[in-house]
Amino acid sequence: MRHGVKFNPLGRKRAHRKAMMRNLTRQLVEHKRIVTTKAKAKALRVHIEPLLTKAKSDTTQNRRVVFSHVQDKETIKELFGNISAKIANRPGGYCRIIKLDQRQGDAADMAMIELVDFNETYDTSIEVGAKKKRTRRAKKKATTDAVPAAEATAEEAPAVEEAPVEEAPAEEPKADDTAEGDAKEA
């Protein structure tokens, strides 16, 4: 029984689990969105949310604490630079887990974990209850728009329209030729 166990060991020893969380954290910070199993995504969210909270205030102590968990200088720069500026006003919930289809090979439940403020698909500027602003489009009048368009094309390409068109001489039908030819032979 797992009474009182607050984390998912993910079937790994402590050192392996710690290294895996570091790697997943680096990838999430670098790419802003990763696809992994649902269990790993949930464990990663528990691991990275406190680090993102620490990254909101840029102090030496917070950098040291986050570095002890991540151990990558480029990730620390990104966390305390771009990411902290985006999540400054958010009180929590920095990550979103979206369930995906099962993996083909072993039917594992897959999920995409992403940083909420870096998703351009969802428009977070509009509040939940607010209605979107509608735009009105003017209806085009066929008579006023068609006349200037025709004049513009006539002015732009006068050489094409003024060039004389040569018609090919009409050929007489071959049926008449054959009838005349038969009459000459007879």
Image (spheres, rainbow, N blue to C red):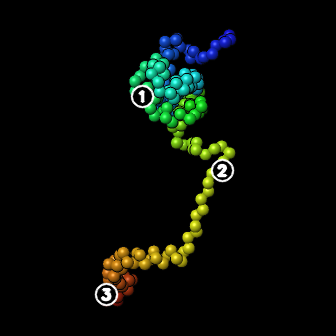
Residue 131 image label = 2
Q: Which residue is mark 3?
A: 185
- Report whether 66 appears left or right of 136: left
Q: CA distance from mark 2 to mark 3?
A: 91 Å
Q: Residue 134: x and y, percent?
A: 62, 56
Circles 3, 1 touching at the beta carbon (< 8 Å)? no
Is label 2 or label 1 in front?
1
Q: Amino acid at mark 3?
A: Glu
Q: CA distance from mark 3 to mark 1?
A: 101 Å
View extreme (front): residue: 59
Secondary structure category for the residue under label 2: loop
Circles 2, 1 touching at the beta carbon (< 8 Å)? no
Q: Amino acid at mark 2?
A: Lys
Residue at x-position 53% and y-position 39%: 119
Q: Which residue is mark 1?
A: 77
Residue at x-position 47% and y-position 27%: 58
Residue at x-position 43% and y-position 19%: 71
Observer-nearest residue: 43 or 127?
A: 127
Q: Relative to 153, does residue 18 appear above or below in the rendering?
A: above
Instruction: State which quadrant residue 109 falls in.
Output: top right
